[in-house]
Image (cartoon, rainbow, N blue to C red):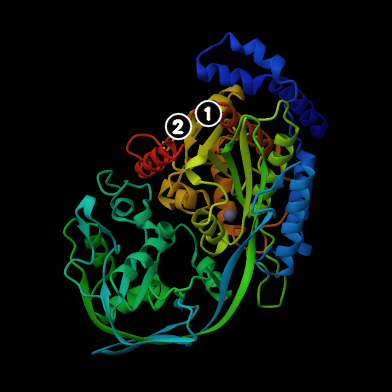
Amino acid sequence: MFRRSRLQLFREVSLVLRCRPIALLAVLAGFSAGLAAGCVSSPVTPSFEAERYAGHVRILASDDFEGRRPATVGEEKTIAYLEQEFRRAGLEPGAGGSFRQPVPFVELTTRPDAALRISGAGGDTLLKYADDAVYWTKRVVPEIALTDSELVFVGYGIVEPAMGWNDYAGLDMRGKTAVILVNDPGFATGDPGLFNGRAMTYHGRWTYKYEEAARQGAAGAIIIHEEAPAAYPWEVLHNGAARPQLAIDTSGGDASRVGVEGWMTREAALRVFRAAGLDFDTVKAGAAQRGFQPMPLSLEATTRVANDIRRITSNNVVGILPGTKRPDEYVVYTAHWDHLGKSPEGSGDTVFNGAVDNATGTAALIELARAFGEVRPRPERSILFVGFTGEEYGLLGSEYFAEHPVVPLAQIAGGVNMDGMAVDGRTRDVTVVGYGASELEDYLAASAAEQGRVLKPEPTPEKGSYYRSDHFMLARKGVPMLYARAGIDSHEHGPEWGLQQNTDYISHRYHKPSDEFDPDWDLSGAIEDLELYFDVGLMLATEPGFPNWRAGNEFRAIRDQSRAGAAASQ
Ligand SMILES: [Zn+2]
């Protein structure tokens, strides 16, 4: 019964869709007279179907694909499937005659000491590995040690001259270990004048913390985990650290990174600060205030980390649909195909299926490729479809792609990244991560309005999600990238319910073996989102202009510069 009405709905939607994209183009371009003509000249606009879409997700998230870890049998099955579907869609190989862009990885399996020893005048505090702290080295070395490394509390570990903020002021960090709070002072105080208020800036991301500590020359960097500002439970870090780590295999062996990186629990931090004669919460509150001074803790850290080093090759999968009129200009769709593989511990369900994260996005990539393959007339700009590897290990495939692009990045008009599609039905809203970033949102808003939906900022900007998936690697090179997600305001159950579903996913399935395909999912929301992403891409592939970041956005200057360079070379 339910199934039939849903099918009916799709028929209706696809009927409306027949003329929709061109009509939207006309509206955007400001000539409404083009509307009728647009319908005639675009006789084939494909539709999306939940069952076909679900079929891809079911396969990609099956135990047979072993959790899609890079450089495993799971990768081979996954990229073979992507390749087959890209070919079926009529795409051409997009990486130098091949669908595969090889990405060199180094795999580090950490064998940490059983504890991180913190010594001071009052004796030793032992932070047990896994229970109290996790630590590793991302340097490609067989062994590294921290020996009586002086601990310094550097607050949020942020250096931002534009904001007059320097948590390392007056310090020489060489040989020392930074103890750092996660997120940023704006999150901690809610003060909209500090960093971006509750919304996380890049300065709040843990990746930034290690990068800055490395710039300061620190020997070690330990972040204090607190669930609210980190946005995920300790278990996620614990599970992550237990698995072999991946990094892009650079000639420098990542020697510029901090020697020992890690996290400690809040409980461990309470003990460490007590050993230093300090109250953690008091000191922490001070770190969110202007004029905070870094504090040597009169404690020393000692531990040792050994690495098993293995060099492996993984692959980004790249397909291209050549444009008819401007083939050297591009629209890009991206989604990471990888996930976390299988658990090294052998009992129970050991496969991290990554059904939502990101079999749903990979299936969306496949479906968009199929749809664009069917569009007649063919789009004017070329369309790139990229399945990234190594997202789960630090946006590695996209970083490599951005550093070794298969087409000039300045020639990419814009793109859409998909990481986790809607599985809880239709919504009245569309969640835009990093809301307000670029003009691509105007395209999305126009298409969403056709569905009777509105754009909304993400409900939890403090999680820093815009910095947490692959579009970020292209964005920071200036390419306008849209990253939207399932809305919250469920048609059937309302917004509270929708938010609850999100929270439930993060607590119970995110990065756990329980993120599995569920035949009871309501994929009608994913189908609507696919229609939106299709429209945005078709508009981008048809219009002559290059959209930009909005004024004041952190990536706009980079884009203006690269576009000016591209224009000058033509
Ligand atoms: Zn993901």
Label disc, if present, on residue 51 of the rendered structure:
none
Residue 53 image position (x, y, % from top left): 75, 43
How far from the left and from the top, in percent, is residue 478? 43, 44
Residue 445 horizontal side relative to residue 379, left or right: left
Residue 517, image x and y in percent?
73, 53
For label 1, the residue is 443
> Which residue, given by chain and number where applicable, does mark 2 sit on?
439
Left/right of residue 310 with respect to residue 7 in the rendered view: left
Task: Kindly tell me whether residue 58 is visible in this rendering.
Answer: yes
Position above or below: 207 against 431 = below
Q: Amino acid at mark 2?
A: Glu
The residue under the point 46% across, 32% down is 547
Q: How far apart are the alpha carbons under marks 1 and 2?
A: 7 Å
Left or right: where does residue 338 sit relative to residue 446? right
Residue drawn at x 40%, y 58% is 205
Q: Secondary structure at mark 1?
A: helix
Q: Quadrant of the N terminus?
A: top right
